[in-house]
Image (cartoon, helix red, strand yellow):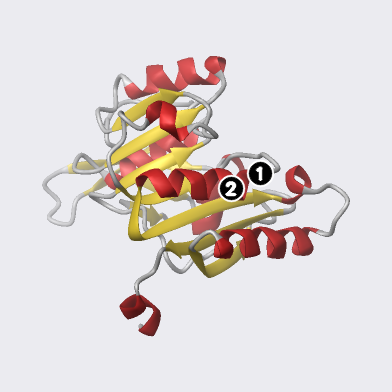
Amino acid sequence: MVRCVQDDSLVTRNLVPGESVYGEKRLVAESADGEDKIEYRVWNPFRSKLGAGIVGGIGACPVKPGAKVLYLGGASGTTVSHVSDMVGPEGVVYAVEFSHRSGRDLTNMAKRRPNVVPIVEDARQPQRYRMLIGMVDCIFSDVAQPDQARIVTHNASFFLKNNGWVMISIKANCVDSTAAPEAVFASEIDKLRKDGVKPKEQLTLEPYHRDHALVVGIYRASKKKKEE
């Protein structure tokens, strides 16, 4: 569902061929047997923390075909639309966005993508949307708030299965503008660990996003998983 093309652009296979979501370029390639045309959408890492993490070489990306993903901080749906491409028709993306203005754009995008469930709510209050979401395989968070680690683990306690994945984009100056980014990242990882997330990977998102890091971990990892 995700690949790099000749000019090193990151692309996702378009779930809705013939349509762009936010004015992005679309590319058409032949299938392996040469009988069909496959359309891809170019994914700009400067506009997406997850895209920047993939381009940066993240080792484990649990967003894959058939996955159920809870996306916190869906904004207007730019990255959510690419996650929709990645999980495909068998997967689902529950996208939570607090801003009503961005939520309108997110909702309009979801009208053409049946695997996206838009939720215009406060991610700090998961009990308000608990009836809309089943258990998920992965939580991706791009919520630029001082308590973003707590927001993620609070949602995980409601919706994330044991041994599920957490992916959080940490914006250092949103947590503490007076501390060095590396110190902020270490502090946030410690908070995640105390709330049941076993960190597996940390990746800088520069040069695409200044003072950002993407942290990937496993939630409530079983002993068997730990031994592996």
Q: CA distance from mark 2 to mark 1?
A: 5 Å
Q: Is residue 41 left or right of residue 183?
A: left
Residue at 19% in and 51% down:
31
Q: Name the residue rendered at 15%, 43% in the picture.
A: 36
Residue in the picture at 39% in, 17% down = 108
Q: Badge 1: how crowded within 10 Å, few (<14), some, or many (20+)?
A: some
Position of residue 185 in the picture relative to residue 194 (left or right): right
The residue lying at 34 percent from left, 76 percent from top is 225
The amino acid on which the numbered mark 2 sits, given as a three-letter code, is Arg
* Residue 8 seen from this side: no
Q: Secondary structure at mark 2?
A: helix
Taking 193 as reference, is 3 above or below it?
above
Look at the picture and state if 80 lies above or below 225: above
Q: Measuring from the top left, give residue 83's x and y in whole percent.
A: 38, 42
Q: Are marks 2 and 1 in contact (CB under 8 Å)?
A: yes
Instruction: Give the residue type at disc 1.
Output: Asp
Give the residue number, with chain letter if any, for mark 2: 150
The residue identified by callout 1 is 147
Quadrant holding the C terminus: bottom left
**Position of residue 166 in the picture relative to residue 142 (left or right):** left
- Residue 95 seen in this snapshot: yes
Q: Secondary structure at mark 1?
A: loop
Front residue of this view, candidates 49 and 45:
49
Q: Where does residue 33 sit, x and y in percent of width and height? A: 12, 55
